[in-house]
Image: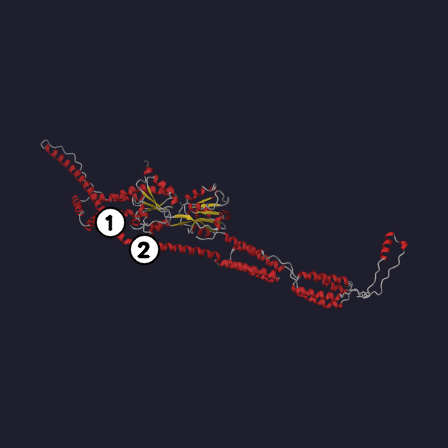
Amino acid sequence: MSQNQSVLRGQCILNTRPLHQQNELNALLESGGASVLAFPAIEIVECEVTEFHRNLSQNIGHYDIAIFVSRNAVDGAFGFLTEGRLPVNLQLGVIGQGTYRALADRVDDLDQRLILGHPYNSEGLLACPELHQVEGRKILILRGQQGRNLLGDELRARGATVSYCEVYRRRKPDYAANAFDLLTVTQFPTLAVFTSNEGMHNAMAAISGSARREILDIPWLLISERMRESALDLGHNAVIIIAANADDEGIQQTINEWASDRPSEVMRKKKPSSKKEITEDPVVSEEIVADSNESGNEDDVQFKANVENKAEAEEKENHLTREKPAGKEAVKEAVKLEVKKPVAKPDPAPKPKKPARASAGFPVLGLLNLLLIIGIIAAAAYYWQQQQKLELEKQATLSAMQQQLATRASKADTEQLQQRLQPLESRLGTSASKIGELEQQQQALLESTEKLYELYGRDENGWQLAEVEYLMRIAQHKLTLENDFEGAAITLQAASDKIAATADPGLLPVRVQISDEIATLKTRSRPDLVGMTLLLAQLTRQIRALKPGYEPRIDTSTGSLEPQAIDPSTLSVEERVMSFLSSLVTIKRDESLPTQTEALVIDIEEVLENNLKLTRWTVLERDAFQYSRLMDDNVKLFKQYYDLDNAANYDFYSQLLQLQKSKIKPEKPDINGSLEMLKFIINKRQQAPTEQLTQEEDNA
């Protein structure tokens, strides 16, 4: 078995990633020798589909930059997009290596337009040079529901137009009441992995009782420093490890480093107590062991009291170890502590000095000294061996006592807690059902509120634009229905002032169009209807003073017409035949018929007078068609029946020609351009995605 395959041997890792994102990390951890407990803390579901989602392939072309905040955002967005069909000029920003790989599978030329920051979070992406100068650019952020707003707020502060598109939703999985207890019945995790604040809170809400206390005492691996504060708020009091990278490989690498440092940490916890006890008196150690053996059969309270004094020193040093982060620095700190603590060892026997050469009379003295030195060395070795044996026995006894005490205390505590928790669990079940109902009601209320806002909601600028549109319509009515050029110009100027009050630079083209229309209205010539009416009245009174160029007469005829005699010799054959036939017809005159024929008399003065009166009436009624027809008749009659060589007649005729050229309804200018432009801008803004809610970086 290789070192890489055994570095996690004996470790049990709790994986809280969403279920569909666990396989890769589980495989990496299991390949290292660890066992993995899958406990998904977040469930990814589809978002509510809107019209903007259905047209996302067309809508995304209106933006300069699209930012995918997570792998789930890529998967959700390409439920509405076509792979390989993104606009070629669209830059793509991603947060995290997992997001990059998911997007690279769908976009061929991703590296040519990629924006990828380091570290892999919102702050790292904002540090990219491509996002420093974004004034006037349009940016679309694709994310989950109710994400963080840090990214969008900062980009708006830099001058960009930011819109959000939520392509998936995160929700808490439906856990059974004892799901975590059943999961850990055979093995409890030695390390828990959390990749988002929301998942961390969901998991802790589903864990209760003794399991909650135990999981708060094991190391947690988080993906950002920002999550550390949330972990402390939940009551975590063990080592917190921050992953070097939020993707699966980065998490596995961090866990491997933690696991490789873990044996040194265990040794550091065990060494101080053993070294400390070596210096104790052996007789005292024997008494401690004896007392421990005797107290094993006594009451639990006395049993616990005997253990507390022996474990106090070890607990203090363990507390120091628990507060320090795991890793190479902790091992170095442990080594320093070990160096500072005195270690008692048996005094080495003094090296015997080379004995002086004995005199020949005393050979026995040197032999006795040698035996004495050997005996001292043997006694020291025996003493050291016995002390080590006693230390091992004492440690075994203390471990057995602690285990027995923990077992008895845990059984009693468990029974008492179960009795106390039964009514609480029933209440929690009722409360959970009520909370579920309240959440459903809250969601329904939120949806209805959003619909009401879509129907009736307007901000201050929205109301001002509605007033501008109303004023523009009034100006059109004044011009079209009332021919009021001046009133239409004044109304358009009021609309322009309203636009200026909004301080919206996007409406500048509308104000320019309004200014052109006002200038057209003011420069367009308008008829002097009052002057035309007075002139027609003057001509009507003047017509009787003019003399026509003819004399009215009556032509009368009396008697009958006698046919003239025709010489038959001058007629042709056909004419003779017709004459013969005519002679056969007798024509008699009815004496009752008048014998006098009266010619039609026309009073041209009366006709012109009546026409001029009717023409004056058409001016008052502003009937351009009748006015034009009557003036044509007036000019024609006067020219036909009056002598234009007469100075008075010619002056009258000149005034008629002047009135004929005048128009009582001048051509109206088109002032619809500004209104159509305003409606186009408003519709374009309404079709853009509404800005609501960047999420926690679950960059898996």
Q: Is residue 234 left or right of residue 496?
A: left
Answer whether residue 348 is visible to the viewer in this image.
Answer: yes
Total residue callouts: 2
| Residue 682 percent across, percent down from the top left | 52, 55
Label 1 vs label 2: CA separation? 24 Å
Answer whether residue 246 is visible to the viewer in this image.
Answer: no
Q: Considering the numbered disc 2 on the image, is that residue within a helix, a strand or a loop? A: helix
Q: Which is nearer the eye, 603 or 587?
A: 587
Q: Which residue is mark 2?
A: 427
- State the residue at coordinates (48%, 57%): 455
Disc nearer the start of the sequence (1/2): 1
Q: Quick one: which residue is furthest to the front in this view?
A: 584
The amino acid at mark 1 is: Lys
Mark on residue 373?
none
The amino acid at mark 2 is: Arg
Q: Considering the numbered disc 1 on the image, is that residue within a helix, a strand or a loop? A: helix
Mark on residue 411?
1
| Residue 188 percent across, percent down from the top left | 30, 45
Quadrant (top left, top right, bottom left, bottom right) of the C terminus: top left
| Residue 178 percent across, percent down from the top left | 32, 49
The answer to the question of whether label 1 and label 2 lie on touching residues, with beta carbons closer than 8 A, is: no
| Residue 60 percent across, percent down from the top left | 49, 47
